[in-house]
Image (cartoon, helix red, strand yellow):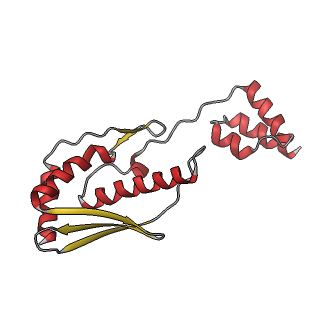
Amino acid sequence: MVHKKLMQARIKLQNTSLKKSGHNKFAGYSYFELGDFLPTINNIFNDLGLCGVISFDIEKATLTITDTDDGTQVQITSPMAEANLKGCHPIQNLGAVETYTRRYLWVTALEIVEHDALDSSAPVDKPSISNARFSKAVDAIKAGKYTTDKLRSDFALTNEQEELLVEALSA
């Protein structure tokens, strides 16, 4: 019976108006945070006689959805990953991993539709670099204080600057 109730929960959820409160400023898109949908899911699950519990182990996270009337269950799993957020303690990185994983498990279980950030995010335009700053960057590369990879990833070089860079480094 759990599958039937889960399908009913999906339909009820899709008929609500969820609002995305998360915003990725770097890539310019909005996304669902747990607080955007979990309270609604909990109410729907309570009404239908379902209960969702998430557990974590070293290799995977599992969302177990149980029909509270007959005890049948369905499990949604996801492999565990690491987070390495700058300036954070290991426990904060663990918290980030668990929060993201919880969100993805619920999104998967309830078939919550949101855009695919990897496929739909527009490429981020790189700024240009002035010729004076470019010359300083080339000097820094020659001195071993900067790299060509970093220069190219940070700035949109003109064809002329690319040619000058190749010439300067081959001299």
Drawn side of residue 29 relative to residue 112, left or right? right
Drawn side of residue 51 relative to residue 20, left or right? left
Residue 127 position within the rendered picture, expressed as x and y whole percent measured from the top left? 60, 31
Drawn side of residue 163 relative to residue 13, left or right? right
Q: Is residue 38 above or below residue 27?
A: below
Q: Give the residue drawn at x 68%, y 37%.
A: 159
The C terminus sits in image quarter: top right
Pick whichever, 171 or 119, lies toward us. Answer: 119
In which quadrant of the rendered view does residue 6 lie? bottom left
Q: Is residue 4 above or below residue 15?
A: below
Drawn side of residue 124 relative to residue 15, left or right? right
In the rendered picture of this protein, how many numbered marks are placed on residues?
Answer: 0
Q: Is residue 162 above or below residue 113?
A: above
Residue 25 position within the rendered picture, expressed as x and y whole percent measured from the top left? 45, 35
Residue 33 position within the rendered picture, expressed as x and y whole percent measured from the top left? 34, 45
Residue 23 position within the rendered picture, expressed as x and y whole percent measured from the top left? 39, 38
The N terminus sits in image quarter: bottom left
Pick whichever, 168 or 145, lies toward us. Answer: 145
Q: Give the residue drawn at x 79%, y 43%.
A: 166
Q: Give the residue drawn at x 23%, y 47%.
A: 39
Pick whichever, 170 or 11, lies toward us. Answer: 11
In which quadrant of the rendered view does residue 68 lie? bottom left
